Amino acid sequence: MSSVPPPPAGGRRLRVLGIETSCDESGVAVYDSQAGLLGHALHSQVALHSEYGGVVPELASRDHIARVLPLVDTTLAQAGLALSDIDALAYTRGPGLAGALLVGAGVAAALAMAAGKPLLGVHHLEGHLLSPLLSEPGLDFPFVALLVSGGHTMLLQAQALGSYRLLGETVDDAAGEAFDKSAKLLGLGYPGGPELARLAADGDAGAFDLPRPKLHSDDLDFSFAGLKTAVLTKVRALGEQLGARQRADLAAAVQQAITDVLAAKAVAALQRSGLGTLVVAGGVGANLCLRSKLDAACARLGARVHYPALQWCTDNGPMIAYAACRRLQAGLAQPRRDYAFDIRPRWDLGELSAAA
């Protein structure tokens, strides 16, 4: 069905059905430890939330309820499997919107009970972190990871599966939030990040001088709230003079400022860690300007940089099924057979351990 290959060989064959419902995408996938990705289906709620300019949690939860079971049926049909053929079911346990997480967790638990299969909750950010390995199974630990997903911006040293050391994170707004909030100030639609990137392609990034917070700080932390405020100030100062040309230039300047900081901090993390591999994951990892800067910077360092395939940058089922499969094969997870489940809307990635 897919070009997504299996993970490194080892352990018994596993077929895992993964369900992702942390925010505004309903994703389902079946991953086979020997054959790779067997099937997946995704429904995006962009159209549902676009008129509100952002995600409405209650609407997101209701839509997940309507979508998940049909997506499960579609995915199993793609894979040519029955539910009884699945070895384990996995769901996104957190972090995310509480109501949305409950939908995926509840459906996964019910299906697991019906089929008599084990149940496993997966950390959403670990799913993103491992998503580049979906396309590059030869990629291995250790590496530095730049994780830029929705409300998260962080640098990690990934020493091994389940062993992640935080190097730096945002102290206020995440990069994705800076993209989205700046897009909203420019009158762009939802989701703002991709819209801003499209507009920036027609702009001159040098037309506006915007700050790059913490670019030269001694730490590896990020801060983007000041950039958002600077954009607001520019928009108000221009007033009615904010025409199509100025909007494109300001979009380009915003993108340049955000990606300058992300690239500089990622390079600094590589240098401090002494590692030669950078992995980029999360929705902002799809930004082509960021990828271009990281490619050039890593080439100068003699380092390698890896990205997820574009379809795996945003939330998706395969990353959850894959993360669960890797943990189960490595013996790092204790799946439940009592079919009780819980969610963690706030869940520090650092809490994961070999015993989780």
Image (tube, grey):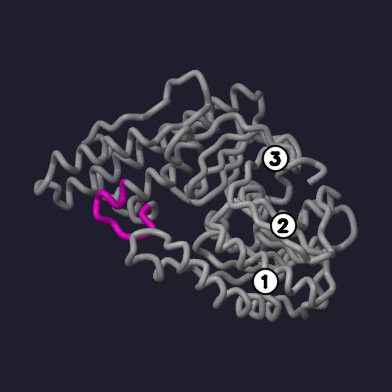
The quarter of the displayed image where residue 337 is located? bottom right
Helix, strand or loop at disc 2? strand
The quarter of the displayed image where residue 109 is located? bottom right
Query: Which numbered disc flags the more N-terminal residue, 1 or 3?
Result: 1
- Label 2 crowding class (10 Å Cα cut-off): few <14, some 14-19, many 20+? many
Q: Position of residue 70 (x, y in %)?
A: 61, 80
Whether residue 218 is visible, yes or no, is yes
Helix, strand or loop at disc 1? helix
Vertical relation: 56 (above or below) 226:
below
Q: Position of residue 179 (x, y in %)?
A: 37, 46
Query: Which numbered disc flags the more N-terminal residue, 2 or 1?
Result: 1
| Residue span colored magenta | 182-192
Name the foreground residue: 77 vs 336.
336
Vertical relation: 295 (above or below) 219:
below
Whether residue 35 is visible, yes or no, is no
Residue sitting at x 35%, y 38%: 256
Amino acid type of the residue that numbered disc 3 sits on in the rendered structure: Glu
Report how far apart the C-alphas of labels 3 and 2 lie in the structure. 14 Å
- Label 1 crowding class (10 Å Cα cut-off): few <14, some 14-19, many 20+? some
Report the residue marked by disc 1: 107
Residue sitting at x 69%, y 64%: 18
Report the residue marked by disc 3: 351
Q: Quadrant of the N terminus?
A: bottom right
Farthest residue toward the top?
A: 218
Determine whether, in the image, residue 247 is placed left or right of residue 191.
left
Report the residue marked by disc 2: 121
Say the numbered circle drawn on residue 68. none
Magenta run includes residue 153: no
- Label 3 crowding class (10 Å Cα cut-off): few <14, some 14-19, many 20+? few
